[in-house]
Amino acid sequence: MKTKIRRIMCKEMAISVGTLALMFFVITMGFAQTPLRKDVVTLAAINFHAVWGDKARNLERIKGYIVAAAKQGADIIVFPEMALTGYDVDLKKEGKMQKENAETIPGPSTSEIAKLTQKYGVYVALGMPERDKKNPDIIYNSAAVIGPKGVIGSYHKIHPYKPELKWCRKGKKPFVFDTPWGLIGVGICYDSYRFPELARYYAALGARVYLNLTAIFEFRGWEDYYKHTLASRSIENSMFVVSANLVGKDLKSYFPGGSLIMGPALNSRIKTYAGPADKEEQIVMATVDLSYSDSARTSAPLFTKNPISGTPDWRPKIYIKMLEDFIKNTKEGK
């Protein structure tokens, strides 16, 4: 029954607020009690320089980093947002580069990557523009996820940043995928820094790892903004964060890298296990024990019963009511 609920959640997320409240309750009670599987996993984030508009060259280098990381023992390998094509939007051309290079998922590039994930038994998350299978005029800023059995699916960025809206459509559904280490959640850049709901939702499902595919460019104070926000997502949800950023010159922007892996530790609420990477291409890798996430969630019982109150500290029914009131009574909500 729990497996059936999980499948429904991954496929049918476009639902009413009232239904969402009920499903949150079912998920919270169900996934919190699901026995966890493997704990020790090796995570890799790739500090990657995407050559703007040169998809073929980028794909070959992506494949090279997959092989290199896999041979070093990585289980899950994360590339940045839009790593396949480069990020910057040519506003005068209305995002023509992204539109021309978009592919369906599965498609040519993900099928090439699937050959490697099957050969080495690894999982890969890769940022790319995705063309809708049914309507080729619709394109998403996506994270393709490929595993040992081939292409798993994709996450469509729910909160595209301003210039991205010149070429991509807003996504509507969260995305989790199952692994021997349990569920893993996916977000892209702006999703992670300004919208804490997504990581919290994945944590409520039982995910202990959150993948942040990002293209955060260099600006004054970027490093504190980047590290502190991701640290907040980790602490809030007692989960591991794997963040992969672009590095180097894009069309116009400069990306500073900083890929990192952070999460709960044996004797602290948060630890940076690897990175932040410097301003060069490199593989950032760490072997972590996901049971630290379980221990942290027990000490702060967000999703399990508080021994004093007898109920979880996280209260989704109240939050749903707040959102219902906002939608009903404000112009913005409508």
Image (tube, rainbow, N blue to C red):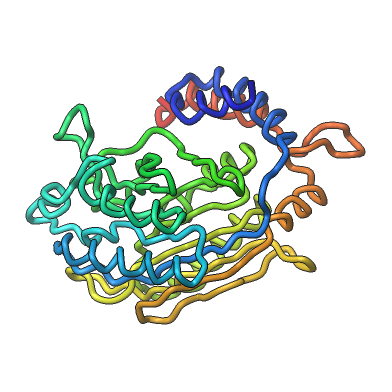
Residue 99 to residue 25: above or below: below
Q: Residue at x 24, y 53 (%)?
A: 163
Residue sitting farthest toward the front: 119
Q: From the viewer's side, name the closer residue of 15 and 266.
A: 266
Residue sitting farthest toward the left: 93
Q: Position of residue 230 (x, y in %)?
A: 54, 61
Count of marks, rendered view: 0
Q: Position of residue 78 (x, y in %)?
A: 43, 60
Q: Position of residue 299 (x, y in %)?
A: 82, 51
Q: Residue at x 32, y 46 (%)?
A: 142
Quadrant of the rendering where the C terminus is positioned: top left
Q: Position of residue 329 (x, y in %)?
A: 49, 23
Please identify the quarter of the rendering in which residue 83 is found: bottom left
Q: Residue at x 52, y 75 (%)?
A: 275
Residue 71 to residue 201: above or below: below
From the viewer's perspective, tell me whether residue 118 is left or right of residue 232.
left
Q: From the viewer's side, name the closer residue of 192 and 261.
A: 261
Quadrant of the rendering where the N terminus is positioned: top right
Q: Residue at x 34, y 68 (%)?
A: 246
Residue 238 to residue 59: above or below: above
From the viewer's perspective, tell me whether residue 127 is left or right of residue 286.
left
Please identify the quarter of the rendering in which residue 153 is found: top left
From the viewer's perspective, tell me whether residue 172 is left or right of residue 84.
right
